[in-house]
Amino acid sequence: MKSEKHLVSTLDAPTSDCCGGAHAAHAPAPVAAGAVGRLFRIATMDCSAEESDIRRALEPIAGIRSLGFQLGARTLRIDAGEEAYAPALEAIRKAGFDPQPAQSAASQADGHEGHHHDHAHSHGSSFGGATRLVAALVLAAGAEALSFFAPDLLAWKIAGMAVAALAIALAGLDTYKKGMAALLRGKLNINALMSVAVTGAFLIGQWPEAAMVMALYAIAELIEARAVDRARNAIKGLLDMAPEQALMQGKGGAWAVTPVAAVPLHAVLRIRPGERVPLDGVVIQGSSAINQAPITGESIPVDKEIGDAVFAGTINETGEISIRVTAGASNTTLARIIHAVEQAQGSRAPTQRFVDRFAAVYTPAVFAIAVAVAVLMPLLAGLSWQDSLYKALVLLVIACPCALVISTPVTVVSGLSAAARRGILVKGGTYLEQARLLKAVALDKTGTITEGKPQLVDWRAWDEGGPANLTQLAAGMAARSDHPVSRAIAAGLKSEAADVQDFKVLPGRGTSGVAGGRLLVLGNHRLIHEMGLCGVELEAELAHHEQQGRTVTLLADESRVLALFAVADTIKQTSRQAIIDLKVLGVTPVMLTGDNAATARAIATQAGIEDARGDLLPEAKLEAIRDMQQRYGATGMAGDGINDAPALAQADIGFAMGGAGADTAMEAADVVIMNDNLERVAETVRLSQNTHAILWQNISLALGIKSIFLVLAVFGTATMWMAVFADMGASLLVVGNGLRLLRHRH
């Protein structure tokens, strides 16, 4: 399951291939910044088949970081090194397309204008295309009427053929251009197949049917492209939640309404009750309750006071606050969430790779059957050459694998968007699809099962001959660390912090530094034991606290223990239910913690976990994951700290608790839980089960319909009408079925 670890980290747009798959090279990054690169308009790119061709053409080009397709707007955003643009554009031209520079993509990065422009462009081009296709459909119906009702005279036949030809030109001119380009390159894509089928039908006298088939095909393609864009743009609706203007304090202290794109870092903004937060920032004045649903998926307001972080797009519900901006418009948490989902949507899930390989064989195989029917039926079955050729043309329409290939990316994209709306960032279709296979999940204790906000409940000086400024030394050491236990000690002592030099983190043990002219350590039981400073009396004192579920941290110099600090944490309200949910799904929860075994057992008992393993260093957690993989099978890992990163990387699927998690943990993980709610792990498994079920429903539906009409075409009375309805109807059915995931609820 980990063979494509971090495969999707830099691709910034989803795929939706009609005749192929997504291809890109990637490097790890949990959440990327806003969209950058160059924007190109490709007039003949309006279907997922063309997107697939372009992706394949660009696959060998080094230096391309991401590709962003918008079929409705017919635009492609390329993010690459300067040296890669020239060969990339040349490769696109060799594939039969003409990319023309559009507005600067980079200029859109600092605001929402590009987002709105793309949608306006998409709607405009779709409207014009729809009008043209409706006219083509009316003409095709007219050709059918002339064929059925008009007298059997040459003049009426010529008139009918002219009307049919005009309908084909209106609906299929682009299809013909792209089909001829594909045939010249020796490719059998859907445009080539439809061009040959419609032309052949027209030449054998089935011109009304040829016109209607081309019109219906073009209309179905337009509907399909809109549905695909809806799936890939579903998550972008969150971007509209961030206001485009902010009330900013100027240099003279005056307040003025300013576009968010023009707001610099560290600017001060005022947000009134009922308004949305325009940019990420830290509260510097006032307090309020903030609805953080766009970020975490939870609509329950969170109290915010001075020093607390707020996020763009969230809603200020109760009080007026002032914030200091910490991120520009292109780099807010909301923008990075959207971009991360777009990156993930660009990967190909295992089922999609299978379907792409199958489609690569299916289309030429059916084409070969069509040729065999055209050539052999007159010889073996006594059919006329015209009837045999007509059957072959019907088979060409059936040979289009649209419904089969488009079913997987739309389903995966919809699943990823549904997860993001719930505060779950899945870094690729691989992890979304394979989370259902998990048999066990290892859970870190602090910040994952517990609140990660421990409080100092007891402390005492251990050596009476210790320094007089003991609390200042401890506060100085604790204040330098971002570990929850250290923060609790610093907050609980409420003492002036001593200056600490040469500060170092000792992973899995604690910290060290020089203060007051002496080398100090602030660490756990393991560290003090390794230093040889534990005695019988100290061991008894530690055991007393540990049996109560407390975490004990000790301050020591090189020769003696100076003080001990007992910190207690409480489990999250959601942890017990999360453990129940995992067990119901058949997933075994196991606690892994660097804390002592007694504390681990106490917390595990409260949470309902039977298997708790304490005193684990990062490498020991890594070995524990390997042991679980051998014992249970596919194993997940949920954690939030730097010391969890190796285990997260080793696990088949790593879950980082994102709201309070370390960047290192978020980089190593495959799924980021934005609201730190452990219940989201089980929800990810359930969503994975739903996604997998819909994927195979779609594959069965597409193959079933194709198989039925393949048999009817060879041995029965299938017509081109039936074939195009079967192909396009199946495509729309599987797209609609995949879009159901957008309505996924807990």
Image (spheres, rainbow, N blue to C red):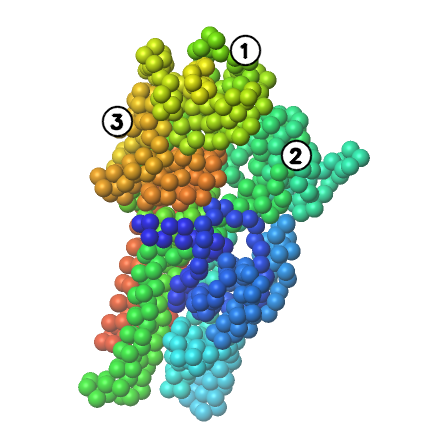
Residue farthest toward the left in the current orientation of the protein: 380
How would you rate the neighbour count of disc 3 (Cα within 10 Å): few for under 14, some for 14-19, many for 20 or more?
few
**Residue 714 seen in render:** yes
Horizontally, residue 111 falls left or right of residue 212, namely right
Of label 2 and label 3, which has the lower sequence position?
Answer: 2
Res 324 label: 2
Q: Tag 3's secondary structure?
A: loop
Q: Where is mark 3, residue-wise?
A: 610
Three-letter amino acid code at the position of disc 2:
Arg
Horizontally, residue 118 falls left or right of residue 640, namely right
Closest to the observer: 7 or 420? Answer: 7
Three-letter amino acid code at the position of disc 3:
Glu
How would you rate the neighbour count of disc 2 (Cα within 10 Å): few for under 14, some for 14-19, many for 20 or more?
many
Q: Where is mark 1, residue-wise?
A: 468
Question: Where is the C terminus found, in terms of image quarters?
Answer: top left
Residue 552 place in picture, x, y as percent: 40, 18
- Residue at 55% across, 17% down: 472
Q: Tag 2's secondary structure?
A: strand
Vertical relation: 230 (above or below) 208: above
- Residue at 63% across, 49% down: 111
